[in-house]
Amino acid sequence: MVEKPRLITGIHLLLRRFNNSLSENEYLFHKRVGTGFFDNYFSVPGGHIDGFESPVDCAIRESQEELGISIRHEDLHFVNVIYRIKVPENEVRIDFCYAVTKWQGEIKSNEPDKHSDAKWYPFSKLPQPFVPYIEQAIKDIENKITFTQTVV
């Protein structure tokens, strides 16, 4: 009998603003460090859902933990779900992606042991290297695609 894969859920926050001079969206990215997972790659803020926490509540908690900002429920906009099959680990990961354009507080790096200072980058010039499945999801989101699937 085949063992059922573990299911792990998480969220990704896509803090987004429109740059009028470039006529395109900019996103807040940071470089991962010291986590053992895609260290030195760029990504977006996010994390795992704790216990029976909802994805929205997780997004709000992670915004406070990682960036020191507050986001209201109504300011989180679902834009994509990433479905990742990780065969070697016998895992399925489901990550909910939320776009955010309004928040309270000043963005700061609250977890410097996990990521570098956050900076804004235009969509057309994503920094490299970038966590591959997040990069694909951002491209999908820009194209109004709400489902991204990867197999590792």
Image (cartoon, helix red, strand yellow):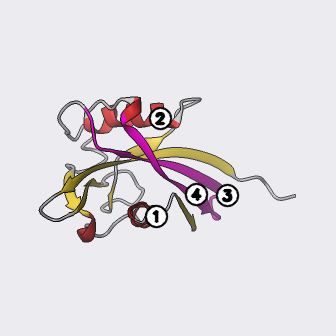
Q: Position of residue 71 (x, y in %)?
A: 33, 32
Residue, disc 2:
56
Residue, disc 3:
90
Among numbered discs 1 and 2, the one appearing first in the sequence: 2
> Residue 86: which quarter of the image?
bottom right
Give the secondary structure at mark 2.
helix
Give the secondary structure at mark 4.
strand
Q: Is residue 50 left or right of residue 85?
A: left
Residue, disc 4:
83
Q: Amino acid at mark 1?
A: Tyr
Q: Is residue 38 left or right of residue 66?
A: right
Among numbered discs 3 and 2, the one appearing first in the sequence: 2
Which residue: 28% across, 70% down?
128
Q: CA distance from mark 1 to mark 3?
A: 18 Å
Instruction: Pick whichever, 64 or 144, lies toward us.
Output: 144
Q: Position of residue 70 (x, y in %)?
A: 29, 30
Q: CA distance from mark 4 to mark 3?
A: 14 Å
Q: In the image, which is nearer the foreground, mark 4 or mark 3?
A: 4
Span colored in magenta: 75-103
Give the secondary structure at mark 1.
helix
Vertical placement of residue 80 versus 113, above or below? below
Category of crowding for the residue at label 1, using alpha-carbon neighbours closer than 10 angstroms: few (below 14), some (14–19), many (at least 20): some
Among numbered discs 1 and 3, the one appearing first in the sequence: 3
Q: Amino acid at mark 4?
A: Tyr
Name the mark on residue 133.
1
- 117 drawn magenta: no
Q: Amino acid at mark 2?
A: Val
Q: CA distance from mark 1 to mark 2?
A: 21 Å
Q: CA distance from mark 4 to mark 2?
A: 18 Å
